Amino acid sequence: MAASSGLAVVSALTQTAAAATADAPPAPRHVAIIMDGNRRWAQARGLPRLAGHRAGVEAVRRTVRASIQHGVGWLTLYAFSSENWRRPPDEVVDLTGLLRHFVRAEIAELARQGVRLRFIGDRNRFSPEIRADLAAAEETTKANRRLILVVALSYGARDEIVAAARAAAIAAAAGRLDPAEIDESRFSSLLSTDGIPDPDLIIRTSGEQRLSNFLLWQSAYTELLFLDVMWPDFGERHFAESLAEFARRERRFGARPG
């Protein structure tokens, strides 16, 4: 009888969990995150800046796992902005070194989890060795579909938009593009995010409330969420709560309600 009762309890719990999953609202297709607060996190603990960036890598691992768990299809991380090149040279060296280590060390695990890596931004500013590592990571994971992990490196949205406008102007001047045919869809195809759906939700950590030159074109109708938590402390609970907040919002895309 005890064994039978135990099985009944397990069955009831399983059914409850299944029902809760079925009733849960669908996850956003694409979540983008401005990972902010590494340096302040380290400073508050009397640690060197690099310790904050390393702790931030752990948060990346947690967020990738959470994205898969919650059924998010696309995750974009703002890892290194075009403005970050202005930071002290030693910090830039630390950041680029950590980037290379992450790509090399994590590629096997990401591939095992079914994660495809894609990088956007001006990778020409990185060393040939880092560029080769980025290309190898993209090639190694290109067949994976469980989660598309987009990492924005040396990325700036204004630069991206200017580059797209320049490409359109050059094509028009060469007679390959009729200016009258340029619409939102055609212009979007010239951006580095071509083929990537616009983000449904952008999360920024550390309490700052701005986009900081991140996905300006793509975020026209994106839900924005600003969290008062430093990126190294960001975990699965914060991710789940962010998705719950997204589910509570009514997205109208400029249309009048009901």
Image: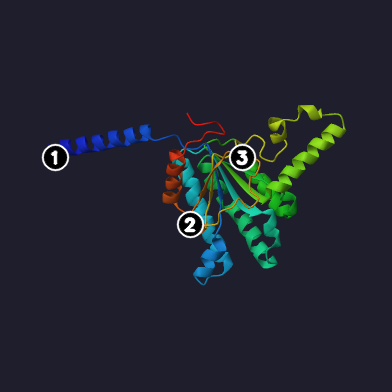
Q: Earlier in the sequence, mark 3 or mark 1?
A: 1
Question: Of residues 100 and 218, which is closer to you in this image?
Answer: 218
- Point out the residue furthest to the right here: 174
Q: Amino acid at mark 3?
A: Ala
Q: Earlier in the sequence, mark 1 or mark 2?
A: 1
Residues tagged 2 and 3 counted as in contact (Cβ below 8 A): no
Q: Is residue 256 left or right of residue 247?
A: right
Describe the element under mark 3 as helix, strand or loop: loop
Residue 160 x/y as whole percent:
72, 44
* Distance Cα–Cα, label 2 vs label 3: 23 Å
Q: Is residue 135 left or right of residue 172?
A: left
Question: Of residues 86 and 89, which is closer to you in this image?
Answer: 86
**In this picture, is 2 found above or below 237?**
above
Front of the two marks 3 and 1: 3
Q: Amino acid at mark 2?
A: Asp
Q: Is residue 86 left or right of residue 54?
A: right
Mark 3 Cα within 10 Å, few/some/many (few <14, many 20+)?
few
Residue 66 x/y as whole percent:
46, 45
Q: Earlier in the sequence, mark 2 or mark 3?
A: 3
Residue 43 x/y as whole percent:
54, 69
Mark 2 Cα within 10 Å, few/some/many (few <14, many 20+)?
few
Q: Residue at x 70, y 49 (%)?
A: 132
Describe the element under mark 2 as helix, strand or loop: loop
Label 1: which residue?
Answer: 2
Question: Of residues 54 and 113, which is closer to you in this image?
Answer: 54
Looking at the figure, which quarter contains the N terminus?
top left
Q: Residue at x 43, y 46 (%)?
A: 240
Describe the element under mark 1 as helix, strand or loop: helix
Front of the two marks 1 and 2: 2
Label 2: which residue?
Answer: 228
Within the image, what quadrant is residue 137 found in?
top right
Label 3: which residue?
Answer: 220
